[in-house]
Image (cartoon, rainbow, N blue to C red):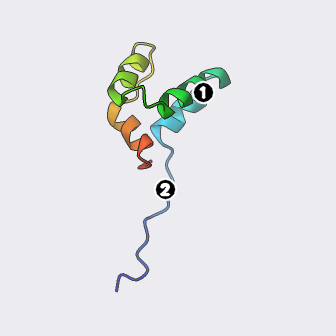
Amino acid sequence: MLENLKQPERKSVSRIEQVMKELSPSDQKILQEALDSPEWSANGLSVALAGRGIKLSAATITRYRTGQR
């Protein structure tokens, strides 16, 4: 019965993808490096970005990092 069960194809754009499109190429690189860095906690990065006017929740960052995009 469930042999062909597949996760639906994602049609929406993630919040991180939305933010990336709004940034300059140099800022995109900086954000990507921060997202990839184990030195930044999800909460710490969220707070630092909020201080610069970019709203990304710690949960969004964690989902991104764990591949649950």
Classify residue 5 by image quadrant: bottom left
Which corner quadrant holds the N terminus?
bottom left
- The front one of 3 and 8 is 3
Horizontal and vertical percent position of residue 15: 46, 37
Residue type at mark 2: give it.
Answer: Arg
Lower position in the chain sequence, tag 1 or tag 2? 2
Horizontal and vertical percent position of residue 14: 47, 42
- Residue 10, numbered circle: 2
Which residue is outermost to the right? 25
Horizontal and vertical percent position of residue 52: 45, 13
Q: Residue at x 37, y 38 (%)?
A: 62
Judging from the image, what secondary structure is the residue with disc 2 in?
Answer: loop
Q: Residue at x 34, y 31 (%)?
A: 58
Q: Horizontal placement of 4 versus 19: left or right? A: left
- Residue 28, numbered circle: 1
Which residue is outermost to the bottom? 1
Eyeballing the image, is 34 above or below 4?
A: above
Which residue is outermost to the top? 51
